[in-house]
Image (spheres, rainbow, N blue to C red):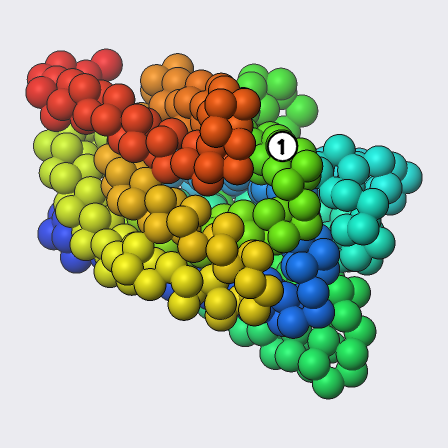
Amino acid sequence: MTETNAYYEKMTKTPLTRLIVSLGIPTTISMLVTNIYNMVDTYFVGTLGPSQQAATGILFTLQCIIQAVAFMLGQGSGTLVSKALADKDVDEASTYVSSAFIVGISLGIILLTLGVIFLEPLMMMLGSTETILPYAKQYGICVVLTCPIMIGSFVLNNNLRYEGQSFYAMIGLTIGGIINIFGDYLLISIISLGVLGAGIATAVSQCISFTILLWFHFKMAQGNISFKYFSKDLKIYQAICTVGFPSLIRQGLNSLSNGLLNNITRPFGDAAIAAMSVVNRFSAFVMCVGLGVGQGFQPVASFNYQAKEYDRVKKGLLVTMGISIVFICILAVPGMMFPETVVRLFQKDQEVIAIGRFALRAACFGVIFMTLSVPVNMLYQSTRQPKIASFLSILRNGLLFIPMLIISTNLFGLVGIQISQPFADIVAGLISIPFIISFLKKEKFD
């Protein structure tokens, strides 16, 4: 109980900027490393050719699908674990994390089985062409085989974060990311395994991250993972899924929109798919700063909301938005100013560079507006207001991006593809403003 009381004091008394930075910086670093190794994949595979590089874009979509399930379970259970710890109920926290972890591994095994059986049609559904397909299958089988490990890792990572152990969550993901980077170099450049080498490096890094995160969870977390705490009460899973549903929407729509993007881009050739893959990877790299700081804010918002420290939640939102815009601009502005240089780092093909140049400049401008939409989305999810959080999650990649992509491509062709995501980012940010103001002005809370 002493540990629980100390954690309570930390979350409710530590100055907000210091608290959010201390929780957000490790998360941001781990996300940066994760996105760096995604870009390293893109770089090394890009040396093999546009079709091989386009395969990484196809598998990026598949990874988003897996992450959608994992984030729903991880952030749903993590929010409820934080709530339980604010009430100083460690057994309840253990029930949530154990149930989410065991169910996540089970779902991962189901996805693994289906992925192995239907690998080729799955790759085609996600936007592969006949020329990309052999490389997508090589990478894809490695991703599919690690489904249970990936989901388990995200559940562990999120629950460590919501318990204020972001540093240990960072170590698990960062070590895996570094191993992936060296694995890409070894297996692609030295051993010459091609796209399969990139897939093996990704699979091995995921397994190592999972092992480290599981060890840290047993050593550092207050909520225990054990079959003893595995719940048979459907209300537990309903609560986890309800709170985590915005994360499922956010990541699920990201998967759907990426798959749709690949399919709509397919008639423009492998170079166009490769170019948009580079742009999406770099955009994700920039976005991870805002997401990292926002994820540092989530346990602060969840814990203090349950503890009825509502002013701290409001001030925390403003602090998070301020930090996010500074960090994102540091990364986005160079992308706007030197887009050709950035694209050339990953692909020397002139057609890819020509397509990616304008798309990257537009994407970096649009990402800046996510400093409005991401923190407020995470705020409403962490304060257990899933309806508003779900609506805000649907905006970017659902209500805005998908219709814009279809309409603008029919009107403007390839240019329509290049401007669709930035348009969605800008409008989603502007629509988020009233929700920010509403929460800041609210005086009575349930």
Query: Does residue 205 appear in this view?
Result: no
Q: Is residue 121 left or right of residue 412?
A: right
Front-most of residues 120 and 324: 120
When the figure is inspected, residue 174 is found, relative to residue 151, above or below; the finding is below
Q: Rate crowding at label 1 as few (under 14), some (14 to 19) or many (20 or more) other CA atoms within 10 Å.
A: some
- The number of numbered badges drawn on the structure is 1
The foreground one among 355 and 20 is 355
Q: Residue at x 70, y 53 (%)?
A: 55
Quick one: SS at disc 1? Answer: helix
**Looking at the image, is 193 positioned above or below residue 283?**
below
Rendered location of residue 127, percent (x, y): 70, 38
Image coords of residue 133 (percent x, y): 81, 49
- Left/right placement of residue 206 relative to residue 158 reads right
Q: Amino acid at mark 1?
A: Ile
With respect to residue 207, does 131 lie above or below?
above
- Report the residue marked by disc 1: 264
Q: Residue at x 50, y 50 (%)?
A: 355
